[in-house]
Image (cartoon, rainbow, N blue to C red):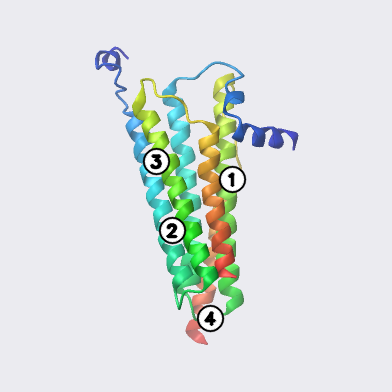
Amino acid sequence: MSAGEAGAGRDPGLQPERTRLAWRRTTLSAAVATVLAVRAALHGGASAAGIVLCALCCGLCLAFLRVAHLRIHALAAGTPPPALAPRHATAAVLCAVAMAVCAAVLVV
Amino acid sequence: MSEFVRNIRLWFAPERVRDEGGTPDYRFSLANERTFLAWLRTALALIGGGFAVDQFLPDLRWAWRVGLALALLAAGVLCSLRAVNHWVRCERAMRRGEDLPASRFPALLSVVVAVVAVAMVLVVLVRGEG
């Protein structure tokens, strides 16, 4: 504990850094899902519905990136870092759910 | 059920989580957040798997293809909703100093993934013979 306090309040377990990387990994997962969505939407000729769903998935991915960006900045802002706001957690989850709904529309 | 509705209200109301108990060590909160993100990645992977089944098994019968894809997508939706619900419950338990909530969900998800995997094996075998 004293070692952590000596290092200008730096946590020896690097918890904020690990959390930041977890957010980064999650944005990468969202990007992979979005690439698959774009491929599914535009494969075999682009229909109007396909383009709309493609744009929707890209928008959802950007919204997720935005949430992650805000959270990463909040983590870097202060020690101890503030806790995750439920609103952000819900926003991130709603992006994933909306992407699944887009996928269901594309598949059927 | 009312407990569940109360949890859903908490998803959207950040200040109400802080109404009860004391603030836990921030390291525990961050660990809880990372667990939430791990579940969210699992959900995104399931959603990606749904897209992949639809995309990369084009000569499968329509019903099988759509059925498998929808099963994976539904698992993804459940997984992400459960991620935020479990995160709220853990956060509240930590604030109140209670035990962390037990959950059947990991077992349920494993069973669903196993069933989908067996279905895939059957599909591949049937296609190999037919």
Residue B126 disc label: 4
Numbered disc 4: what chain? B
The amino acid beneath tag 2 is Thr
Do the residues indicated by labels 2 and 3 lie within the same chain of the protein? yes
Instruction: Give the percent coordinates (x, y) of residue A62.
Output: 43, 49
- Mark-to-mark CA distance, 1 and 3: 17 Å
At mark 2, the secondary structure is: helix
> Which numbered disc, 2 or 3, marks the residue that appears first in the sequence?
3
Q: Which residue is mark 2?
A: A34
- CB within 8 Å, label 1 to label 4: no
At mark 3, the secondary structure is: helix
User: In front: mark 3 or mark 4?
Assistant: 3
- CB within 8 Å, label 2 to label 1: no
Neighbor class of circle 2 (other Cα within 10 Å; few <14, some 14-19, many 20+) is: many
**Residue found at x 47% / y 53%:** A59
The amino acid beneath tag 3 is Trp
- Vertically, is B15 above or below A97? above
Residue B119 lies in quadrant: bottom right
Q: Which residue is mark 3?
A: A23
- CB within 8 Å, label 2 to label 4: no
- Mark-to-mark CA distance, 3 and 4: 41 Å
At mark 4, the secondary structure is: helix
Q: Which residue is mark 1?
A: B81
